[in-house]
Amino acid sequence: MPAATTTTTTTTATTAMTTTMMLRAAAARSGTRSLAALRLPACPLPIARLSSQTPFRQLLASSRAPASQPASRSYRTRSSDQLAQLAGFGRPHSLHSGSAHKPPSHHHTHHPQAAPAANRIHNGNDINNEHEHDETETEMERHEHNLPPGIPDMAPSAIAQRLCAGQSFAVTPPSIEPVVVRVDACELASNDPIEDAHFCHAVSSAASTTPASKATTATATTATAAAAVTSSCVADDGVLLGVMDGHWDVHCARTVALSLPKYMAAALSTARSLQPAGNSDSPLPPSVVRAALTSAFVHLDADLLSLPARVIQGFDDMSVKDIAALPASVRLEAAHRLMPALAGSCAVSAYITGSDLYVANAGDCRAILGSRGDDGVWHAKPLSIDHQPDTPSELEALRRAHPGEEQTVAFRRSAGHPMRVLGNMMPSRAFGDARFKWPLDTQQRMTALLSNLRLRHGWQIPQFCYTPPYITAKPDVVHHALTPADGFIVLASDGMFDLMHGKAGDPAPASSTQLVRIIGDFLDSPSKYRVHHNNAATHAIRVALSDGVGRGGSASDRMVSRMLTIRPAGEARSWRDDLTVVVAFLPAVEYALRDSLLETAGDHRVMSRIRR
């Protein structure tokens, strides 16, 4: 196959031109005036150019976490570590020869598969039983090969403390319309450090009336983009939410969490400025909002892919030999600066304004709407689809875009394994992942740049990579008109759904239906749980870890304890992925959040604002 010869700069310009045409077409359809020029603000990523004279030791990689963010937390308490020593936890652990260990189904082949919930043994314990166990140790030993190799004896209070370390609450500033009454979020790491991230911001044209000193901040994880965001552009009042599921390291997900809300606000503000003068107070037409959100995703990804030319002066004009001749210290510093493009991240984002909900999704995170039916039961409405080659429409699009590569553009490594792009990548849409997008001449220069460097993940041009790009960050955007029956919106990374299973015949994917019913049960019957979390996202993660989703929501503390005390990285990834859940409660369920068991007692923060 001929190698693509387009330079990185040309690719970025072409992408920007395409998305500009999309917004112009949307504006024309909605009756707005013609676009003279559409340009988003300059990339907000702190980029530094490298040359042979650059003082490299003084540069900080743009993808590194700010110094103010807390360090990664320990995966065990001291007491559980002592239990581990007593149990011989340090000895090599091997699964029973009869256990079913599934092949990887996540983004990269070096990540093992989380064991399906259906293959685990139910202990039958409700969380009401703090220290009582329905099974004897002899029965537990018989089933040991099907259980996670963690420690089963964490106290319920220790379990709650571990889960609550990653949770947060947020409310809208008092000066804007409360399109959501509260946002609950929780993250739980499996990788070290966690590769998920999320954000929650208010969008408003009014100046904040809440002093920052009076905003109480709950404990937040290092991946939460909670810092104040300011922009010269502004969109209609509303809320921006997002969940990122990173892979091949943390850098892309963190960068997207920090930058995507700015790009979304800028695109929406540009769309608003193009409305006729008499329409300034009316909602933006759905076609315009769809085009704006698509533009934000595509522009951000194009800026990530243009990092080589922005980090290394003259990169596009350098030969492979020129790059290979750079000092190792120069190449290493450049590699750190390029990590947001080398790593990858799926993303799902929601924009809630007035009675309109928009969801933009690129990858296999999910967005679900929870609505109460006439029968009083909570029903799930999926607002996204999984962008994977196993999805027929995605596979067809890949094969159509790469004629003559039908056998290699996506295939299974062996029977029973999932389809992967080029046999390697699970998601067919994502930010970053430059090795599936950059032209081959750029990839060859990148091979010279990264050669013989000590990086956490190595660099290699994928096999069968003939005509990139193979994946894209262009999202599917869904619009939903909210009704009084709509109670909450859930955004979650795919690791959450790997732990869940539901009833056959459910109209929504079974795992999505189960997640909505867990949160609905959280609202309707909070008093049924003795060990209670007032954060819906934390509650949902605890039930999923307990394997209680198949038993009407009852939870096993022994199972949760095991899942929380598995050693991080390789061993933990054999049982679960990073977990991130964001739940936005709509005004229809405000009455339920007034229950004394669900109140936050002031343990919340006011959302940071993107404002004029």
Image (tube, grey):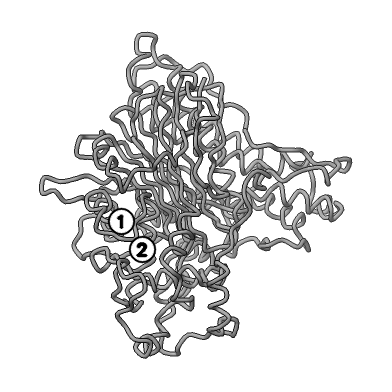
The picture places residue 56, in percent across and down from the top left corner, at 83, 45
* Image quarter (top left, top right, bottom left or bottom right) of the N terminus: bottom right
Left or right relative to 528: residue 445? right
- Residue at point 43% right, 60% down? 160
> Residue 30 appears at what percent x and percent y?
34, 21
Report the number of numbered marks: 2
Q: Which mark is residue 515?
A: 1
Count neighbours of disc 2 (C-alpha within 10 A) and say few if under 14, some if 14 to 19, many if 20 or more: many
175 up-or-down from 96: above or below: above
Image point (32%, 66%), residue name: 127
149 left or right of 530 in image: right
The residue under label 1 is which amino acid type?
Answer: Leu
The disc placed on residue 336 is none
For residue 301, which quarter of the picture? top right
Q: Which residue is mark 2?
A: 544
Question: Outermost residue, left direction?
Answer: 375
248 shown above or below 123: above
Question: Helix, strand, or loop for circle 2?
Answer: helix
